[in-house]
Amino acid sequence: HPTACCTLPAPSSMPPKGKGKEGTAPPGLPRIGERVTNKLIPVFDAAAVKASFDQDAKSKAGEPYLDVDFDGVLPMPTALEAEVSTWVRPKELGEAEPYVLEPTIDPDNPRVLANGLDTSSSHREGTRELLDWLSSSILLVAEHAPFVAEGNYLWQLIHPQNEQGVPRYNERGRYVVRLFDHGEWRAVTIDDRLPLDANKRPLFPRSKSPLELWPMLLCKAVIKLASRTVSGLNRNDPMVVTAITGWLPQVVPIDPARQPEHLVWEELIRALADRGAMAGLVAASDNSDPDAFGEVEAAGLRTGPLVMALEFRATHDRGNMARLKSDLLEWKGPFADTDEERWTKVLDEELGWHRRQRLRKVAAGAFLPDFWTSEASLNSFFGSLYIWRDPAEWTHSAKLSGITHVPGHQDALLSLRGASDLLVALTVSPAGGTAEAPCWVRLDRHDFDETRAAPAKLHLDASRTASVVVRASPGAYHLSCHSATELTDFPAFFHWTVVVCASVPLALGTPLAVAADEGGRKTGVLATSEYNAMEANLWALPVRARVAFKGDPGDWADETGRVPATLRFEPHDDKAARHLCVHFVDNDTGQEVSLAALHGSGLRVRPGQQAAYAVLVETKAPVDLNRDAFTLELRSPVDTEITLEPVMPLVTTLGAYVPSFAHTASGKHVLFRIVAAGASRSTAALRLELGDPDAEVTVRVWRYSKEAPDGVVFKTKQGRGVCVVASVPVEVGDGGKGAVAGARTVVEAELSRATVERLKLLRPPRGAAPHPEHPLDPALQAADEEALLAAAAAGGSNLAVPSKGGARRQSTAVTGDKGDKRRMSKAQPGPPPEAAEPLAAAPGKLAYKLMALSDVAVTLEADDSREKELAAMKAAWEQGEAGRFARGMASRAKFLVHAGALSEASAQALVATLPAPTAAKGGGGGAKGDGRKSKPNSRAQTPGGTANERSALWHAPIIKPAGGEPELLGPEGRTERQAAISAAEAAEAERRQALFDARGGHHGPRGEAIAAIASERARARESLAASNAAFQETWKQLCAERKGPEDNPPEPPKKGKSKK
């Protein structure tokens, strides 16, 4: 269909009046195949329009011009058709010469409606509603005259014009009105014939000056533009304002019962705060509830007029208030000027309304069209909010047009180069026949390498024209236009136009064109590379690449300086593609994006960073993967460099969850805290596997430095059974070359409370009887001892080996590609961990395996910083108070005996194995290892070993004191010991009760004496009160008996000598 500008034909070349021959299309409706298709109105061309009117002036005067479209008879809207009695030329309206615009215009204010609009109407209800809508739409544009672009204001749309751009009267009666439709300003040609009603009055909205023509010519052009459908122009149609301004409409229904709170108010204030927007409201017209509709009418509203929204305020006295205006209605609802109940002096002053002065003006006969009302009134009395936005206020825009029919739809692509608000507008009109059907445009996120449908970003419905504002991130979007009607005998064709406006550069077009634009990005490709073969069930990183983005991003950068990028990893082996996962990592911030589909768009990167990003490809396939080639592709607007990095052998550490009383009390169940260190600074990928596939774990990466000695959380990830952290910063270990003092990375894993309870990993409360699954249970101890001894004899290293004092020590192994291994800790040699059976979940226990892969040699060691600090503090305390350690050991031995688990000899032998505190360097009494003082009687001053060593008294499965094997009590011995302890406790309770009774007998006489004294004091107070009451009564009697002048008491004699 024609979308380019075209010139208007000369009047002499216009088709003659009348219908065409049978089988030929009427003028303006050319035939396409066997279907009659409506052609879009030509795009407005100012030069062609002026040339056509110049030719009219040169030609001899002939018959008045007759509009040949629609066979010379303009199809009127259904609401106006019955009211038309005849059509007349302007000269037939009066004896004087008519004019398009009043010639006496104020040059200082040329856009003022000098004559105003005659809004009086005596027509039937349906006709009046449409005429009121036309009048109020014109008044809305006039109210926002300063914001309408030059050449687009009301009468400036009508041609011919003089040299000053003022429309002039054409003797031939031909006018071209410039109206906006389908994303373009178009030339609508009309004649000057005007419809009259039965009272011989012009039907269209008119000026108060009967000879001024511009309102009627403008309305006739709008009606012609809307006449391509059966019903034509309808009331409440936003296309009227769109046609005469070019601003795009949005309709927001008002339904408080189904909408979020303050939705309409937020949309209203957003529109009024925008310079390039205007808003209005229409009354609720739901006749299903007569009572509610009666309240709307009682408030002075009716269907038809558009009420302008001009201002909003958030008041302290009455909340949110809005100032509205209507020249066709008189507001009688809440906060009308006559509403004495709601208006207060404070509100009047806050709004600057001067209500009393307005009431005096109204009493003098003035009509004041504006009024204030509340947010609640907006939701109660109005049905829709209309917003029109000026697309010229957006810095970038694009338009796409086409013809679609049912079945089928049209597809396009939108490329957005930065984050921005999008103004998306859809305009539809029938291209075949006059059938109306709702159409919609759908906006989805698009991935050039992804074929699956993405969730809809936008779904916009329109029966004629509609728009909406939506926030969008950079990237590509798939745009499709659909129609809801399906006609089998005569398929319905529709013109559709999509206009997209944004504040950043964009591209809108066919998929091929936009894909070519996207393909213009610079591409970094790493091809002809191979990854090594991988064994089944072995976690590996077949590809580890360093990525750098360089160059000037230009207008691709968003407000944060980031540019879009796309990633695609393609292994040549289809079997391997099903078992690979790609991670794109920002090493500076720790953010990582996992791409299970091996490709994705929407990545945001910062150019100029050297080696700031990494691409990791991980796998743990259930089958062997052969050595094969792959292709890694990164596309971005800047230069991209991709460099492969080597991957060192796998590092593994194993252990099990060891609960403590501190975990039970605080609710924090820490699985481990491990320090990740390397031969040089780099990043490592970690994989944590738990013995229970449903165990929930949270992994936190802590970074410590001189600036942050207490540590900060670098990143957090959660998992179930397995958790992979693709990027963990690795610092140089202590004593290594290039090590930074205080810099270290600690990986902490914490189990969820639900997992701990489900697996019964909580410790029993203090003082409770030993549970059958308790680590000190003899049966479990014997079983664990036999299993560990058997594993040690076989050379195994997959089980946690007990350390000194009973605490478990984790074993770490490094496995190479050929099965060689190098010990990273003092664990016993054995087969590599990968050859072990999968971790199994035993009742009351949870094993784990932590693996690390990096381009440098990595060590994983338990975080013993707290233990070292406590050891230093204990050594300082021992120096300050000799014998403290010995007293602590005696208390521990007594506690173990009291708990009924060990005999006295075994308890003393056990606590004797704990290491005595060593002298701290430069330490003093009560000081920490770094010289800081600790609080007295704090937990840190508790005598004994480290925290792990103290917990080992309860949890070590094997106890090996220095004096030999422990003397463990059997079930009968433990029962006797518990009975003896219970008897001792009962005797102690009897002794305390006897002491209490004795104390009560001693204090009995003293209590009786105190009670007697209190009773005597009470009787004295009662006697004093009675005496006071008797005195008052006697005084009253004396005053009544006293006599004197005017019943006043005699004055007392004056002091001094009396006269003789």
Image (tube, helix red, strand yellow):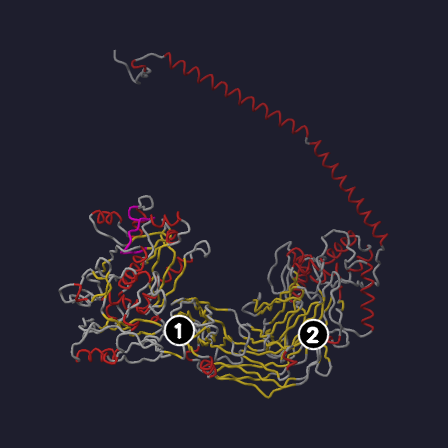
Q: Amino acid at mark 2?
A: Thr
| Disc number for residue 241 | none
User: In terms of secondary structure, where does tag 2 sit?
Assistant: strand
Residue 1009 on image: x %, y %: 64, 26
- The span shown in magenta is 323-338
Q: Quadrant of residue 198?
A: bottom left
Q: Amino acid at mark 1?
A: Gly
Residue 56 on image: x %, y %: 19, 78
Magenta stretch: helix, strand or loop mostly? loop
Q: How many marks?
A: 2
Where does label 2 land, which residue? 652
Q: Is residue 352 above or below residue 983?
A: below
Q: Quadrant of residue 83?
A: bottom left
Q: Quadrant of residue 402?
A: bottom left
| Disc number for residue 432 | 1
| Residue 332 part of the magenta-drawn span | yes
Q: Residues within 10 Å of mark 2 (few under 14, many from 20)?
A: many
| Residue 121 part of the magenta-drawn span | no
For the N terminus, the quadrant is bottom left
Give 410 or 738, whichever is nearer the viewer.
Answer: 410
Q: Is residue 369 left or right of residue 847?
A: left
Residue 654 on image: x %, y %: 71, 70
Q: Residues within 10 Å of mark 1 (few under 14, many from 20)?
A: many
Give 316 or 932, whichever is nearer the viewer.
Answer: 316
User: In terms of secondary structure, where does tag 1 sit?
Assistant: loop
